[in-house]
Image (spheres, rainbow, N blue to C red):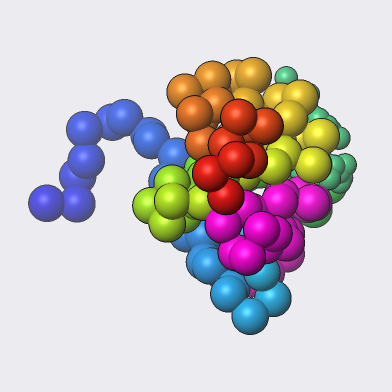
Amino acid sequence: MATGSGGATAEAPKIVWNERDKRFETEDKKAYIEYELRNGGKVMDITHTFVPSSKRGLGLASHLSVAAFNHAQSNKLSVIPTCSYISDTFVPRNPAWKSVLFSEDLKSSI
Ligand code: COA
């Protein structure tokens, strides 16, 4: 059972939602995404993403972003990408998530 098939697939790190501190973070809390809730809690403004320098370039910020966007989507929140990693890297590389972004057009319905 434990032999595997030779395909060394990197396991996705476990990302935890820390509701009290408004973060999505790794279990050791060293890498995280921070957000603020706006418009009565309907808009998630992602203000900061941080990954320790020893772990950068491995996609950890991307995993954190997916957790945050999945949470936003399942809770019908829209996202403001204040953090430049989200606006300049994550969304351009994963354009399907554009549908979750806050847009001016939605303002009238909020
Ligand atoms: N803004 C936008 N994109 C950035 C960036 C920044 N400040 N810093 C790095 N990136 C991009 C790089 O172009 C890199 O692309 P590459 O893979 O072609 O080299 C890509 O992010 C790497 O993606 P990923 O591996 O998912 O990110 P990461 O786990 O290395 O973490 C940061 C990225 C930005 C969270 C990390 O570098 C960090 O903590 N930096 C210091 C804090 C910071 O500047 N945060 C962003 C502004 S809030």
Q: Position of residue 29 (x, y in %)?
A: 67, 69
Quadrant of res 21: bottom right
Name the residue located 62 percent from the left edge and 53 percent from the top edge.
43
Above or below 22: residue 63:
above
How many numbered circles does the render carry? Answer: 0
- What is the chief secondary structure element of the magenta stretch? strand
Name the residue located 79 percent from the left edge and 42 percent from the top edge.
82
Q: Is residue 43 visible?
A: yes
The image quadrant where one finds ligand 1 is top right
Look at the image and give the residue range highlighted in magenta. 26-50
Name the residue located 31 percent from the left edge and 30 percent from the top edge.
7
Above or below 36: residue 70:
above
Toward the viewer: 28 or 49? 49
Name the residue located 38 percent from the left edge and 35 percent from the top edge.
9
Q: Position of residue 39 (x, y in %)?
A: 66, 58
Is residue 37 one of those drawn in magenta? yes
Q: Position of residue 16 (x, y in %)?
A: 52, 66
Q: Is residue 32 visible?
A: no
